[in-house]
């Protein structure tokens, strides 16, 4: 199925101001948001949840990127893995951590490992994370609030990952240096 990459001119009326907002924030309209613009509800939901996470999550920006990489890898999203590989570097996530997440490897830092494992578990168990894994997440120093933050990030990434799967969203030139393909 072909989805258009909308511009501020071609997008549905309700999406036009949202794309203008994205362009003002990033200096360009990433292909993900250009694709989501087909549905003002999807684009608005994505942007609102992104903003809420950025403003209110108890996870640090680095931890958020670890979660988004772990989830995007579990969902096999080429687009989001490339984008978040770049963004994670900008957020000061160590290159070794990013490389390990891109390969679905085990992180060496125990706190990061618990975070990545829990994030993958949310996806793999479709939210029915075994109680022992929940307890291990909390024992690693995380809180119930942060557990729910991981769920919010899973919702955000599921929206973008699935939209990218269906739309075959092309990679933006800005993310090209971080191209990724899931080893199956």
Image: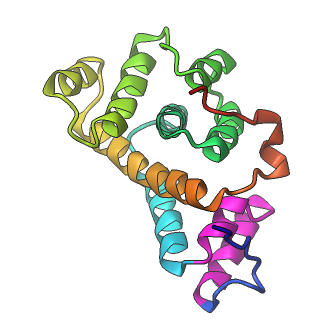
Q: Residue 162 location, x and y as percent?
A: 50, 55
Q: Residue shown at 40%/46% (left/top)? A: 154
Residues 106 and 115: in front is 106
Q: Magenta segment: does it hold 31?
A: yes
Count how many numbered circles sit on residues in the image: 0
Residues 143 and 41: in front is 41
* Relative horizontal placement of residue 17, taking residue 131 as reference (left or right): right
* Relative horizontal placement of residue 41, taking residue 132 as reference (left or right): right
Q: Residue 47 location, x and y as percent?
A: 53, 65
* Relative horizontal placement of residue 133, taking residue 10 as reference (left or right): left
Q: Residue shown at 64%/41% (left/top)? A: 78
Q: In which quarter of the image is the N terminus?
A: bottom right
Q: Residue 99 location, x and y as percent?
A: 65, 20
Q: Residue 141 location, x and y as percent?
A: 29, 21
Q: Residue shown at 20%/39% (left/top)? A: 128
Q: Hey, which residue is sitting farthest top in the picture?
A: 108
* Magenta segment, prevailing SS (helix, strand or loop): helix
Residues 166 and 131: in front is 166
In which quarter of the view is residue 5 placed? bottom right
Q: Magenta segment: does it hold 50?
A: no
Q: Is residue 43 above or below residue 160?
A: below
Q: Quadrant of the C terminus?
A: top right
In which quarter of the view is residue 122 placed? top left
* Magenta extent: 14-38
Q: Is residue 48 above or below residue 120?
A: below
* Relative horizontal placement of residue 161, taking residue 130 as reference (left or right): right
């Amino acid at each position: 199925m072909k989805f258009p990459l909308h511009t501020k001119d071609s997008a549905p009326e309700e999406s036009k101001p949202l794309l203008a907002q994205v362009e003002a924030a990033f200096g360009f309209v990433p292909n993900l948001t250009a694709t989501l613009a087909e549905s003002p509800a999807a684009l608005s939901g994505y942007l609102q949840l992104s903003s809420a996470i950025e403003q209110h999550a108890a996870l640090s920006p680095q931890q958020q990127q670890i979660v988004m990489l772990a989830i995007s890898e579990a969902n096999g999203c080429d687009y989001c893995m490339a984008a978040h590989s770049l963004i994670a570097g900008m957020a000061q996530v160590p290159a070794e951590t990013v490389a390990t997440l891109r390969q679905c490897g085990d992180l060496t830092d125990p706190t990061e490992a618990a975070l990545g494992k829990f994030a993958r578990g949310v996806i793999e168990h479709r939210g029915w994370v075994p109680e022992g894994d929940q307890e291990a997440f909390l024992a690693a120093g995380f809180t119930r609030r942060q557990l729910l933050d991981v769920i919010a990030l899973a919702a955000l990434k599921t929206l973008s990952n699935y939209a990218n799967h269906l739309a075959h969203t092309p990679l933006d030139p800005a993310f090209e240096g971080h191209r990724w393909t899931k080893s199956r």
